[in-house]
Amino acid sequence: MAKFTIFFKDKPIQSTMFESGVVHIGREETNDLIIDSLAIAPAHAAVIVNDSDSIIKQLSADFPLIINGKQLKEATLSNGDTITLGKHRILYNSSETFAPAPASLDPVNEALDKEISNVTLPPEANLQVMSGEHIGRLIPLKKSMTRLGRAGSGIIIITRRKDGYHASMLEVDEQIKINNTPLAEKTVLLENDDVLLIENVSMQFFMG
């Protein structure tokens, strides 16, 4: 299991955990970790999270990948490592002891291809607005990542992964809640009938 905490100006803005698989980092909304900055490539890096190690690989030659102050194309991550992307930094945490980085890029590319080809996504889900002027409206969650909310009022990200739909904060706001509990810096696996409160609007999650 790996935890990634994104910081901007030394302030944590998002924290997400992944059990295994390929974690994509970049500016586009199709990534698992989205950093909305022009200093970040649309597809900046990918981390292969396995039981034994986590390997990060640079995906764009025009956008540097800096690990613990050193510019690298790939590395095996250790607990407490810092990934610097533009003005953002990502703190990597894991309880595992990792093996040394492989000498070649080929195993990384093979693992990426294998993980991508083996991913099976859950059924499509929706949010139904339960209050406010748009009551009854359905918000489909078809993309791999859906962003809700506004800057300054809290932004929530719902990520569609093979084990279900995960909700986490891109911009922390204590007013954003799931089942009346503040989401804060947690990542929550959504279940049918969970109720999200965003900008004082209630939305109910359901699959199928």
Image (tube, rainbow, N blue to C red):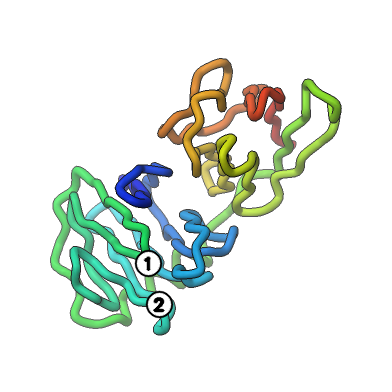
State which quadrant residue 203 falls in: top right
Question: How far apart, in angstroms, are the residues tagged by discs 1 and 2?
Answer: 8 Å
Residue 71: x percent and y percent? 24, 76
- Quadrant position of residue 67: bottom left
Residue 94 higher or lower than 71, as above or below: above
- Verify CB contact (< 8 Å) between mark 1 and mark 2: yes
In this rendering, the answer to whether 32 lies above or below 14 is below
Image location of residue 142, percent across then percent down: 71, 50
Which amino acid type corresponds to the residue marked 1 in the rendered image? Answer: Gly
Observer able to see residue 5: yes
**Residue drawn at x 31%, y 76% as measured from the top left:** 107
Residue behind mark 2? 63
Above or below for 169 versus 173: below
In the displayed structure image, the side of residue 52 where residue 204 appears, left or right: right
Q: Which residue is mark 1?
A: 86
Q: Quadrant of the N terminus?
A: top left
Q: Nearer the viewer, residue 166 or 116?
A: 166
Label 1: element kind? loop
Q: Quadrant of the C terminus?
A: top right
Residue shown at the point (28%, 61%) measured from the top left:
83
Dot placed on the residue nearer the N-terminal end, 1 or 2: 2
